[in-house]
Image (cartoon, coloured by chain):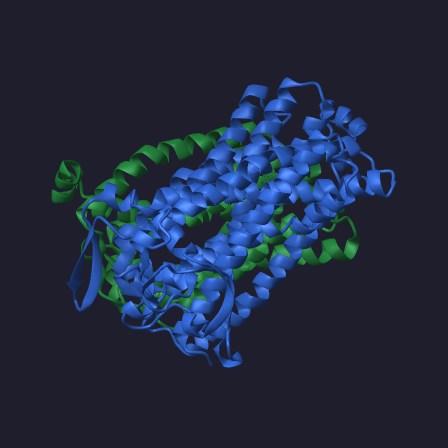
């Protein structure tokens, strides 16, 4: 039996790591779907209807999976982290309730119309439904990130002891909800979601373009896949550089507000100036693999790089080391490596975007098989970068669940036994891995089936959908 | 902040916000039990249909709605957390394994129809059909146990009143599922569901009587509340609604039966809330007054809810009117 604190933390980490994939796909797809719907209504080209219908299916499956996995997270605060919920309920419950009422309701109801109602509502109303769905997904992120960013940079509250338990009282709602971290998180997260979906699209488009143009297979709807690839590249070339720019500013904000997290990201133990930025770093002995202390590592570093990054341009700047903070430290290796890989992926995406656009500009977009292979391999890497980013954010602030206010070890439900926590951990590990497998399987199936054919689209206009004919005529 | 100053000093306009939120939390639970309830009922009725085409129709009847319906559970959790954080924390952590059973059932129920429609082959659809039926039965059953445990302040996982309430809720979801499917289907299928509706209604009625008796016998502290005018009145309303449902089902007044089905859910929830009040967590001795969040967040949430709830009803009105009437046999993704 695991300790209830450890089991609860692992369970939360597992459920959130799986869950986050689905909202990221929804949030990232939302602007694409609005655009496809607009073009479908405004232009006569069948490819836009194909794009809308194809990506709507993926959106719908992602949303349904996101709903059931997200429900678990909401209840886990009560089941596993009751002490946290009691302490922070005043500040944390509100955003969750408002997420449900403001965002989730909007998204879920209009998704019904958006997925099933094309024939039943006017073009204008249908387009508005696509906006409502998109707005819902993004507003959902607003409230979740308000709640999360408050835990990173808590403001606008006072801590009072009531019956021997610390209770957070809301004092200044604007300071609490629009806390310093929120805008950074929101911009970085939303851009990451769109970038991740662009990468997925580019990879899938490249797969079919590669098979058709390079390998010479005959692919139905090749115009659809070419359009997918091009749209994805346009979005990628905008989002990828932006991600690096505000990522850099975001890192500087962390230096100011969570210096301990920044020190863990760079694995800096002693306060120093002219600190190098290690591209890679390893401990000298294998036992220290999970603890790459700066003094013991060998690595490849840019002299003054970390100081330069942290201060925004001064290579001589001083950085606080982890040893300045008392008590337990975050697991440095996890934070250090997650951050490095995320940043490396970010630069790879920029390279990929400009490489693709360059070949396109040269009129060689359908020829370069190396580019196609790179895009295919990179399709899931945007999601990986998002996961790593969240690991840096969440693991990096340990041992705090609310920075400087409440420790994670004090947040778990007091009555929870190790047996209960372990049992549900095992149960959820099986269920969530199963869910992930099923989701992947279904998405791959949708991709292999491809978009509805041009001649099927015309039958849709006469109010009978092609897919259901298949399903009802058996 | 001046705003925070006035909002923090007292509750808005001197309204009894604690009681309003107590009512609101149960109202939202009722919305979930009614809306997702008929989805569960459809899932259970799925077991009575072997014909592939009929099964497709049952699924098509709920697919545009179920996401929206299930969001009421998210909002229930959120509002309980926001208004009564101590209750949220204590209740859910106390019913740890039960909450996970509910969530597991909901995962199965939510995923199964989505998966069912992904492939056309028989084994795949048979297994996901089963998952759909099991999830649709288990979710309201466990929810009923949860509601009973909450009301009675039970700390053990499963008790006799708990099981009875669980089965009552299951029967009620079938009653509502029939009412919904009678709105959404046609011809013979629509006629065949009538008999299922009667059976579920009789079962529901017997279970309500058994539950009330069991509560009367096992929870002496609730006896006086059980005989209070409010609860007796609600039981009478329940009886009347049962009659209306039966008559409306017989005479093919589909909307009347549907609304009577909704009425049954809300009288059930009102009975639970009425029996519980003013306590909100017996085990911890929390009352509505002691468990309510402090005035500032309460006022903010109240303003938010006052603005958002009408909008939510508007969305649902639009959604249900867009997809009103019997489903087309070939309705699917566009």
Residue drawn at point x = 30 percent, y = 46 percent: A180
Measured from the top left, where is residue B56 in percent x and y?
70, 43
Q: Quadrant of the C terminus of chain A?
A: top right
Task: Please determine whether, in this image, residue B258 is positioned above or below residue A376.
Answer: above
Q: Is residue A308 left or right of residue B170?
A: left
Measured from the top left, where is residue A248 in percent x and y?
43, 47
Q: Report the chain shown in blue.
A: A
Task: Please determine whether, in this image, residue B244 is positioned above or below residue B314.
Answer: below
Q: Is residue B35 left or right of residue A434?
A: left
Q: Nearer the viewer, residue A416 or B248?
A: A416
User: Chain B hue?
Assistant: green
Residue drawn at point x = 22 percent, y = 41 percent: B299
| Residue B200 appears in the rendering | no
Residue drawn at point x = 50 percent, y = 34 percent: A134
Q: Nearer the viewer, residue A38 or B10?
A: A38
User: Which of the 4 image quadrants contains residue A365?
Assistant: top right
| Residue B301 appears in the rendering | yes
Q: Nearer the viewer, residue A342 or B281?
A: A342
Measured from the top left, where is residue B36 in percent x and y?
50, 47
Task: Please determine whether, in this image, residue B242 is positioned above or below residue A54.
Answer: below
Count every numbered label the image shows and give the total.
0
Q: Is residue B192 left or right of residue B86?
A: right
Measured from the top left, where is residue B334 in percent x and y?
67, 32
User: Which of the 4 image quadrants contains residue B287?
Assistant: bottom left
Residue drawn at point x = 50 percent, y = 36 percent: A109
Q: Nearer the viewer, residue A449 or A320?
A: A320
């Amino acid at each position: 039996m695991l300790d209830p604190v450890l089991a609860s933390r692992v369970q939360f980490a597992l459920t959130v790591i799986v869950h986050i994939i689905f909202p990221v796909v929804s949030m990232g797809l939302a602007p694409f779907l609005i655009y496809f719907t607009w073009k479908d209504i405004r232009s006569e080209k069948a490819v836009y209807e194909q794009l809308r219908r194809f990506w709507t299916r993926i959106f719908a499956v992602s949303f349904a999976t996101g709903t059931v996995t997200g429900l678990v997270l909401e209840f886990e605060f009560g089941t596993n982290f009751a002490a946290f919920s009691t302490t922070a309920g005043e500040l944390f419950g509100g955003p969750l309730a408002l997420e449900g009422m403001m965002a989730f309701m909007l998204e879920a109801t209009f998704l019904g119309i958006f997925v099933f109602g094309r024939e039943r509502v006017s073009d204008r109303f249908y387009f508005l439904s696509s906006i409502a769905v998109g707005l819902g997904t993004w507003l959902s992120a607003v409230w979740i990130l308000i709640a999360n960013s408050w835990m990173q940079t808590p403001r606008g509250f006072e801590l009072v002891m009531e019956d021997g338990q610390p209770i957070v009282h809301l004092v200044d709602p604007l300071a609490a909800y629009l806390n310093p971290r929120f805008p950074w998180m929101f911009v970085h997260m939303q851009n990451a979601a769109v970038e991740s979906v662009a990468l997925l699209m580019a990879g899938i488009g490249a797969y079919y373009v590669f098979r058709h143009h390079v390998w010479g297979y005959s692919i139905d709807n090749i115009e659809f896949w070419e359009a997918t690839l091009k749209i994805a590249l346009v979005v990628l070339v905008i989002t990828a550089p932006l991600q690096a720019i505000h990522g850099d500013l975001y890192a500087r904000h962390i230096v100011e507000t969570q210096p301990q997290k920044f020190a863990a990201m760079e694995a800096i133990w002693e306060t120093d100036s002219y600190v190098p930025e290690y591209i890679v770093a390893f401990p000298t002995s294998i036992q220290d693999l999970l603890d790459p202390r700066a003094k013991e590592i060998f690595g490849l570093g840019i002299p003054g790089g970390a100081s330069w990054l942290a201060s925004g341009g001064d290579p001589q700047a001083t950085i606080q080391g982890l040893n300045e903070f008392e008590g337990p430290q975050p697991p440095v290796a996890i934070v250090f490596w997650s951050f490095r890989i995320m940043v490396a992926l970010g630069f790879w995406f920029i390279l990929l975007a400009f490489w693709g656009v360059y070949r396109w500009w040269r009129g060689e977009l359908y020829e370069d098989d190396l580019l196609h292979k790179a895009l295919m391999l990179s399709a899931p890497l945007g999601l990986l970068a998002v996961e790593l980013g969240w690991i840096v954010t969440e693991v990096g602030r340990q041992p705090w669940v609310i920075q400087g206010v409440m420790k994670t070890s004090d947040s778990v439900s007091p009555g929870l036994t190790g047996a209960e926590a372990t049992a549900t951990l095992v149960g959820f590990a099986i269920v969530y891995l199963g869910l992930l497998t099923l989701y992947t399987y279904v998405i791959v199936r949708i991709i292999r089936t491809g978009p509805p054919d041009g001649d099927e689209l015309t039958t849709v206009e006469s109010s009978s959908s092609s897919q259901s004919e298949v399903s009802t005529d058996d | 902040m001046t705003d925070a100053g006035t909002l923090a000093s007292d509750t808005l306009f001197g309204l009894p916000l604690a009681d309003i939120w107590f009512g609101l939390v149960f109202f939202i639970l009722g919305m979930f039990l009614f809306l997702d309830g008929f989805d569960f009922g459809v899932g259970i009725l799925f077991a009575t249909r072997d014909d592939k085409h009929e099964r497709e129709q049952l699924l098509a009847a709920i697919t545009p709605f179920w996401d929206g319906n299930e969001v009421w559970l998210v909002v229930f959790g959120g509002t309980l957390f926001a208004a009564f954080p101590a209750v949220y924390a204590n209740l859910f952590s106390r019913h740890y394994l039960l909450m996970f059973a509910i969530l597991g059932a909901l995962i199965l129920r939510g995923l199964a129809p989505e998966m069912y429609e992904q492939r056309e082959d028989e084994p795949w659809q048979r297994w996901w059909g089963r998952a759909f039926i099991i999830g649709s039965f288990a979710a309201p059953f466990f929810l009923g146990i949860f509601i009973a445990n909450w009301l009675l302040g039970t700390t053990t996982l499963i008790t006799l009143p708990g099981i009875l309430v669980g089965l009552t809720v299951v029967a009620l979801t079938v009653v509502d599922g029939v009412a919904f499917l009678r709105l959404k289907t046609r011809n013979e299928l629509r006629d065949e569901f009538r008999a299922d509706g009667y059976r579920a209604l009789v079962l529901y009625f017997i279970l309500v009587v058994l539950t009330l008796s069991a509560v009367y016998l096992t929870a002496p502290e609730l006896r006086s509340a059980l005989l209070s005018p409010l609860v007796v009145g609600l039981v009478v309303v329940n009886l009347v609604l049962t009659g209306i449902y039966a008559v409306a089902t017989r005479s093919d007044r589909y909307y009347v039966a549907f609304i009577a089905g909704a009425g049954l859910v809300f009288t059930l929830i009102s009975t639970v809330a009425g029996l519980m009040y003013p306590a909100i967590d017996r085990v911890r001795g929390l009352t509505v007054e002691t468990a309510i969040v402090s005035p500032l967040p309460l006022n903010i949430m109240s303003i938010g809810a006052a603005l958002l709830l009408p909008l939510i009803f508007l969305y649902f009105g639009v959604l249900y009117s867009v997809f009103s009437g019997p489903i087309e046999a070939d309705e699917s993704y566009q």
